[in-house]
Image: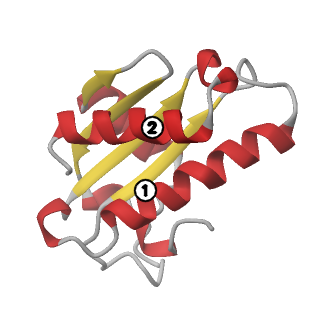
Amino acid sequence: MVLPKGMRLKGYKCFEYIHKSSKRYKSPSMTLKVSWSNPKLINKNSPHSGENSCRCAISISNKVSKKAVVRNRLRRLVHNHLRLRLFKKSKFMNRWVLLSLNPKSLGKEPTVLLEECDKLLLEAGFC
C-alpha cells in the first residue's frame, strides 16, 4: 500500500531542500535524511497542501536493481511500514523524511530491512 497523498513529498525543490538542510542517519543498507518542513515549497493548488503531517519520500536507484519490479516491491514494503509508523502522529508534524536504499539492501530479508528502518527512525527520534 502506498503513502496517503497528504504524506507524500513531491517536486525537485523539496528534494533539494532535504539534501541541503537535513540531518543524516546511516545504516549499512539505507540512509535516512530528516529536516524541518518548508511549506513554501509545497504546491499551493494541491488539495493536501494545508495538511500538517509528516511527509515522506523513498529513493531507490538503479544500482539497487535494474528491474523496476524489484524496486517497486521494495518501495511498497517501506511505504507501508512508514505509513503505519508515522501516519497521524502529532509529535512528528512538520518533518520531512527521505529514505534512500543502498545496493546492499537487495540481498536482505524484508524483516531485516524493516528492523533497520525502525532503528534509523528511533535514532532520528521518530519512535
Can you give x and y, in whole percent of width and height, for residue 69 in the image?
85, 44
Is tag 2's residue or tag 1's residue first in the polypeptide sequence?
1
Residue in view at x 62 percent, y 26 percent: 108
Along the line of sight, which residue is nearer the eye, 83 or 37? 83
Query: Which residue carries the number 2 mark?
Result: 99
The secondary element bearing badge 1 is classed as helix
Q: Position of residue 47 (x, y in %)?
A: 46, 84
The quarter of the displayed image where residue 102 is located: top right
On screen, residue 44 above or below 58: below
Q: In the image, what residue type sits under mark 2? A: Leu
Q: Residue at x 19, y 65 (%)?
A: 93
Front-most of 31 and 11? Answer: 31
Q: Name the quadrant containing residue 87.
A: bottom left
Badge 2 marks a residue whose secondary structure is strand
Residue drawn 47% across the image and 56% down it:
81
Q: Is residue 9 visible?
A: no
Left or right of residue 59: residue 66: right
| Cβ atoms at labels 2 and 1 below 8 Å apart | yes
What is the x, y in percent for residue 45? Answer: 47, 79
Residue position marked by numbered label 1 in the rendering: 82
* Residue 68 placement, left or right of 22: right
Quarter occupied by residue 32 = top left
Dot label at residue 57: none
The Cα atoms of the two marked residues, 2 and 1, are separated by: 10 Å
The residue under the point 30% across, 26% down is 20
Mark 2: few, some, or many residues within 10 Å (few <14, many ≥20)?
many
* Amino acid type shown at disc 1: Leu
